[in-house]
Image (tube, rainbow, N blue to C red):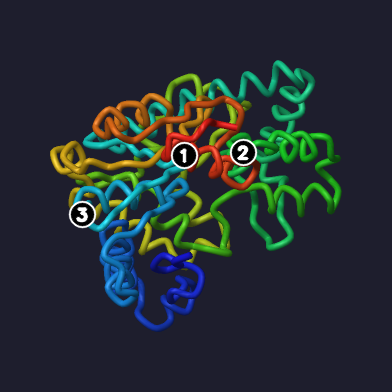
Amino acid sequence: MLDQRGTGRSTPVGDRLLDDLGSAMAAEYLTHLRADSIVRDAEALRAELGADRWSLLGQSFGGFTVLTYLSTNAAALDRVYTTGGLSTVERTVDEVYALSYDKMRTASERYYRRFPEHRERMRRLVDLAAAGNLVLPDGEVVSVSRLRSVGSALGTNDGWQTVWSLLELDPGTNAFRYDLAAAMPFGGRNPLYFAFHESCYADGGATRWSAERVEPADFAADPTLFTGEHIRREWSETVPALRPWRDVALTLAEHEWPRLYDRAALAASGARGAAAVYVNDVYVSLEHSLETARLLPDLKLWVTSEHEHNGLRAGSVLERLFDLAHDRRVR
């Protein structure tokens, strides 16, 4: 298990980085943490281990890194496995987020069909947030956009339980305030997730707050529609833990990123292995995943609605991928 740059024990990104470098240099530092740099780290590790070739498993962003690896160092790879990680190739970040809104619209309506009474509860919470009356234990005055981001949980197998439990609580209680804080993504535990998130989808070009720019009209009109990994510029001002990262996030949003993938190299890579593609994935879309898979004809696909994006942790996904890759009878 390789702790990717900026995470785990690989010099984890935190507020100390701002203290040591200042915002401008910290932003420049973060430009070296994407998949292309991680592939170079992996190649250094492979050389240290003395391995001629090895196999990779990439979950979500790890799968994006696998695609970059296949674009630059395919000869070093035996088999590759990805779970919810076949990112789009040569599409813009705006296309990625536009499609992800479609996925969240479907997930929202599916949730409200199951629990119709919760739409009105969500509407009441939206009114409280708009009036500045939802305040977290750390002092954050929860904005409407932050409240809606609890929908990110709907991208996991049991995440609906998180949303259901939250909406069943009295918003005036400590339990609600603490559970809301825990349910919202992009907090202070790992500021890299906020400052850097849109950048991981940028196969060239600048992101310029893509999720904000491509928000559909119905999402703007109906705040009961949940959002997922759709970050907002305003959070750098309204979320106490993210305020120190405001200048870094603004700088990275304007950064012109180099390409991550090479379509011709992917098609010529001869990649073998298997990929789990989740039909209802709200983070890495089915449509874009299948499009990318067509560049890798020897990569076997398991397309399933049995799991959501976190299927690797929730079931026997990897065992099934091994069976597919080695032409064993699927159990």
Question: Which numbered mark, 3 or 1, is in the foreground of this view?
Answer: 3
Comes first in the chain, label 3 or label 2: 3
Picture coordinates of residue 270, whole percent (x, y): 22, 41
The answer to which of marks 1 and 2 sits earlier in the sequence is 1
Nearer the observer, 275 or 256 = 275
Q: Which dot, 1 or 2, sits closer to the camera? A: 1
* Residue annotated with mark 2: 156
The residue carrying pointer 1 sits among few (fewer than 14), some (14 to 19) or many (20 or more) residues within 10 Å by Cα, namely many
The residue sitting at the bottom extreme is 20
Q: Earlier in the sequence, mark 3 or mark 1?
A: 3
Circle number at residue 29: none
Q: How many numbered marks have been drawn onto this rendered protein structure?
A: 3
Q: Marks 1 and 2, how far apart in space? A: 11 Å
Q: Nearer the viewer, mark 3 or mark 2?
A: 3
| Residue type beneath disc 3 | Ala
Residue lying at 27% horizontally and 27% vertically, measured from the top left: 294
Neighbour tally class for label 2: few under 14, some 14-19, many 20 plus, Cα within 10 Å: many
Q: Nearer the viewer, residue 42 or 77?
A: 77
> In the rendered structure, which amino acid carries the disc numbered 2?
Thr
Disc 3 from disc 2: Cα separation: 34 Å
Q: Amino acid at mark 1?
A: Gly
Q: Secondary structure at mark 2?
A: loop
Q: Quadrant of residue 249?
A: bottom left
| Quadrant in which the C terminus is drawn | top right
Q: Position of residue 266 (x, y in %)?
A: 21, 41
Q: Position of residue 71 (x, y in %)?
A: 21, 48
Q: Secondary structure at mark 1?
A: loop
Q: Relative to 249, does residue 91 appear above or below in the rendering?
A: above
Identify the residue under disc 3: 75
Residue of label 1: 84
Along the viewing direction, whichever of 202 and 237 lies nearer the viewer = 202
State the CA–CA distance, disc 3 to disc 1: 23 Å
